[in-house]
Amino acid sequence: MDQGAEFFAQQLRAVGREDDVDPAYMYAMSRAKFYPRPWNGEISKIEAQTRVAIWNTLVDKYILNEYDSRSRLEIEIEAKIGLDGGPLFKQCEAKGCTNVEGRDINKLKYCSGCKLVYYCSTACQGESWKEHKKECAAKTHRPQMSLSQWTIEQVAVTYSAALPEILNIARNRGN
Ligand SMILES: [Zn+2]
Ligand SMILES: [Zn+2]
């Protein structure tokens, strides 16, 4: 584990959140020179494709080389990223629904209004509409993040002074 990732792992342990970051995610984070989160158009499509390829290759390496009793798919769901910087396997965002694309359902559909929120069915979309209506019109729904990404985001807020440092180390590794 490189210096930046080890430092970050310490912060996670300090706040008792180390179990909320998937070990495969941590593995990739300690080797990649970037920190994935929904990019919101901050990087080009080509750069996004490059990062996705690097990250998901690292997750594949984890699956191949590290001991983990979970199935390949379960690890991929937790740790792989998609072109938007969020999880590769999106989950239905209706309250209480745990359907994941590629596992429980073939394909999720995004809200045609804002294209920012994913549902597994028209039933889930319908149930969420009352709550989603406002943010749909304003297009303010936050892009989906994995549990690991949420945890990192929350811990980053706690250690906001230290985070740029961590990210810089991660970014500059090997330079
Ligand atoms: Zn659903
Ligand atoms: Zn919408």
Image (cartoon, rainbow, N blue to C red):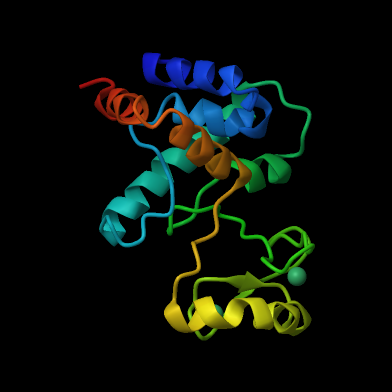
Residue 81 appears anywhere in the view:
yes
User: Outermost residue, left direction?
Assistant: 175
Measured as percent of width and height from the top left, residue 114 is found at 48, 80
Q: Name the residue rendered at 71%, 69% in the picture.
A: 94
Measured as percent of width and height from the top left, residue 133 is found at 58, 83
Measured as percent of width and height from the top left, residue 128 is found at 70, 77
Measured as percent of width and height from the top left, residue 127 is found at 75, 80
Q: Name the residue rendered at 40%, 15% in the picture.
A: 2
For ligand 2, which image quadrant applies? bottom right
Q: Name the residue rendered at 75%, 67% in the picture.
A: 105
Q: Is residue 158 toward the left or the right of residue 89 in the image?
A: left
Q: Is residue 7 above or below residue 155?
A: above
Q: Is residue 8 above or below residue 136?
A: above
The answer to which quarter of the image holds residue 103 is bottom right
Q: Name the residue rendered at 75%, 77% in the picture.
A: 124
Q: Is residue 25 above or below residue 149?
A: above
